[in-house]
Amino acid sequence: MLKGIPSILSPDLLKALAEMGHTDELTIGDGNFPGHSFDTPVIRMDGHGVPEILDAILQVFPLDTYPDANGVMVPPCTLMAVEPGDDAKTPIWDTYKEIVAKHDERGAECFEEINKWDFYDKTRAKSKFVIMTSETAIYANIILRKGVVINK
């Protein structure tokens, strides 16, 4: 055990988080997410939901605050948008925004939504690993882009 580290963060997850650099991304997938279909490492966190994992990660993980190579500010949290024609509700997104607001003063400004296929492509191209959860809410997947730690 370590002091100040949420106990939900396993040694494997802590190692993976520590090895990430600025602008690296990770995906947290719900129970329906095809995380093992991508050519990227998978960290299993069965028995846990996305909100508790997100909150624990954000205690040790800064979200990106820098613009991209074109000078455009891109939100550091990406959600999988509801597919057109699907009447699914996503109240879990409000929970995510509350969690992010606890750790980042930008709050809801940290979020963007992209369609399912673009989300899969982004995971495949950019995520260093996928965290698989037992989350039962649908469209509960989220991608996080790492920022920098600034000592003040």
Image (cartoon, rainbow, N blue to C red):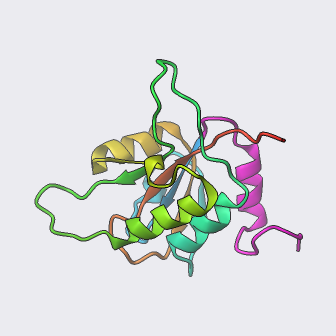
- List x then y, in percent, for residue 128: 59, 44
Q: Does residue 45 appear anywhere in the picture? A: no
Determine if the magenta segment contains residue 3: yes
For the residue pair 1 and 56, the one nearer the viewer reads as: 56
- Residue 82 shown left or right of residue 78 in the figure: left
Magenta extent: 1-24
Determine if the magenta segment contains residue 145: no
For the residue pair 42 and 60, the one nearer the viewer reads as: 60
Q: Residue at (44%, 48%) from the top-left corner?
A: 109
For the residue pair 136 and 149, the one nearer the viewer reads as: 149
Looking at the image, residue 49 lies above or below residue 58? below
Q: Quadrant of the C terminus?
A: top right
- List x then y, in percent, for residue 94: 40, 67
- List x then y, in percent, for residue 62: 67, 48
Q: Does residue 115 appear anywhere in the picture? A: yes
Overall secondary structure of the magenta section: loop
- Residue 114 shown left or right of residue 126 in the figure: left
- Residue 34 shown left or right of residue 150 in the figure: left
Looking at the image, residue 125 lies above or below residue 70? below
Residue ranking furthest to the top: 70
- List x then y, in percent, for residue 143: 48, 51
Marker count (numbered): 0
Q: Quadrant of the N terminus?
A: bottom right
Task: Name which quarter of the figure residue 82 lies in.
Answer: bottom left
Residue ranking furthest to the left: 85
Q: Residue at (39%, 71%) from the top-left corner?
A: 92
